[in-house]
């Protein structure tokens, strides 16, 4: 039986043909218009994301005291005993750490070096401070730095990972997603990526080491804050003294304990040769990083006038270059 296909092959009348051609022209014109609009609107810039609001770092400083020294210098050969003596002279660990707080320790762990080479903070200092914080009832003790060499190797070969974990602390190595844009409010430093662990902590204790530095003469307490930054921080070397002061103004720690047990006197900050290391067996603890840095210059044969960031720090109200004007105490243990 022959199939009726009339419903599939309709014949258009002349009027229908004219209407079809006209509609086809209108459709093509509209399409061309949309293409033209797209070409005019096109931008080579990527889609704009919602801008992240820059955070600000907390002020981690302890309450000032009129009765305790502001600077404690302790000499000896037993690091654990020295750390405890220094902190006790300043009022004891409970002045700085309360039960339930999260405490972040910031040593210098920038380089793939062994402890004897003095390019990083002495691991015994890190371990002793971590134990004190645990004894004070800290809920968590973190140890973190933004290393310049491979971070796993830096924390392992420096001995700091092992010392921290033995003391009950956790090593936190920041990854690519662990940096939060932060308003540093500096003269040079504006918004900059900062390790988020420094935002999450309740207390921050700075544990720098005394070292020579090829660009600014020395790396001490104030310079140690470079290790909170992500991004291309080598850009800051062009105005290194201003950037050091900006960093020290942005992060005000609870306590600073300077490691001068082994001092890298030459070829810093990386070092490598034991010939560049001097055994000084000294710790300097306190609340004034400018004064601590000024005191530490003697181990490198420097004077404050050779280190511009000290005077800049004093001008910004961060401390006093004349450390003797602070209440200070010395002890031998």
Image: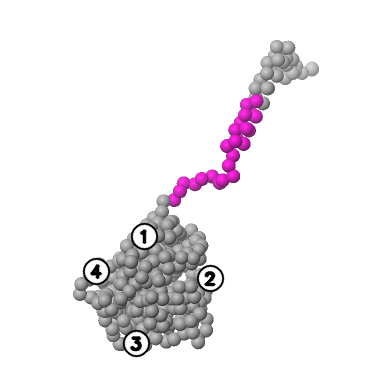
Label 1 vs label 2: CA separation?
Answer: 26 Å
Residue at image point 49% right, 78% down: 268
Neighbor class of circle 1 (other Cα within 10 Å; few <14, some 14-19, many 20+) is some
Query: Residue at position x 45%, y 73% from top?
Result: 216
Spatial separation of the CA atoms under disc 1 and disc 3:
35 Å
**What SS does tag 4 mark?**
loop
User: Residue beneath label 2, please?
Assistant: 150
User: Which residue is outermost to the left?
Assistant: 67
Residue receiving disc 1: 57
- Residue 200 visible in the picture: no
**Nearest-to-viewer mark from 4 and 3:** 4
Q: Quadrant of residue 38?
A: top right
Counting from the top left corner in percent of width and height, residue 57 is at 36, 60
On-image quarter of the C terminus: bottom left
Mark toward the start of the polypeptide (1 vs 3): 1
Image quarter (top left, top right, bottom left or bottom right) of the N terminus: top right
Tell me, for residue 236, which label it has, or none.
none
Could you tell which of marks 4 and 1 lies nearer the N-terminus?
A: 1
Which of the numbered marks, if any, corresponds to residue 76?
3
Question: Would you say 297 lies left or right of 115 here?
Answer: left
Which segment is the magenta one?
29-52
Outermost residue to the front: 305
Q: Which mark is residue 64?
A: 4
**CA gap, disc 4 and disc 3:** 28 Å
């Amino acid at each position: 039986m022959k199939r009726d296909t009339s419903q599939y092959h309709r014949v258009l009348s002349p009027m229908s043909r004219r209407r079809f051609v006209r509609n086809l022209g209108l459709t093509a014109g509209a399409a061309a218009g949309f293409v033209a609009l797209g070409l005019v609107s096109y931008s080579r810039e990527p889609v704009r994301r919602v801008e992240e609001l820059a955070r600000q770092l907390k002020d981690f400083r302890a309450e000032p005291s009129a009765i305790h020294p502001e600077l404690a210098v302790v000499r000896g050969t037993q690091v654990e005993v020295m750390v405890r003596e220094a902190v006790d002279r300043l009022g004891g660990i409970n002045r700085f750490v309360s039960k339930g707080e999260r405490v972040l320790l910031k040593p210098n762990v920038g380089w793939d070096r062994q402890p004897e080479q003095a390019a990083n903070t002495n691991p015994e200092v890190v371990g002793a401070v971590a134990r004190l914080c645990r004894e004070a009832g800290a809920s968590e003790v973190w140890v973190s730095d933004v290393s310049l060499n491979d971070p796993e190797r830096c924390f392992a070969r420096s001995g700091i990972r092992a010392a921290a974990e033995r003391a009950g602390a956790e090593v936190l190595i920041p990854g690519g997603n662990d940096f939060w844009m932060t308003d540093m409010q500096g003269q040079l430093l504006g918004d900059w990526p900062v390790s988020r662990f420094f935002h999450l902590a309740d207390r921050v204790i700075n544990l720098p080491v005394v070292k020579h530095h090829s660009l600014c003469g020395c790396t001490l307490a104030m310079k140690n804050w470079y290790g909170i930054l992500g991004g291309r921080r080598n850009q800051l070397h062009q105005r290194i003294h201003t950037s050091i002061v900006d960093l020290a103004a942005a992060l005000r720690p609870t306590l600073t304990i300077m490691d001068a047990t082994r001092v890298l006197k030459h070829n810093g900050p990386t070092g490598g040769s034991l010939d560049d290391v001097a055994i000084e067996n000294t710790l300097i603890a306190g609340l004034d990083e400018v004064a601590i840095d000024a005191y530490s210059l003697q181990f490198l044969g420097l004077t404050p006038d050779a280190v511009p960031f000290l005077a800049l720090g004093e001008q910004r109200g961060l401390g006093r270059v004349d450390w003797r004007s602070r209440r200070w105490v010395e002890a031998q243990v």
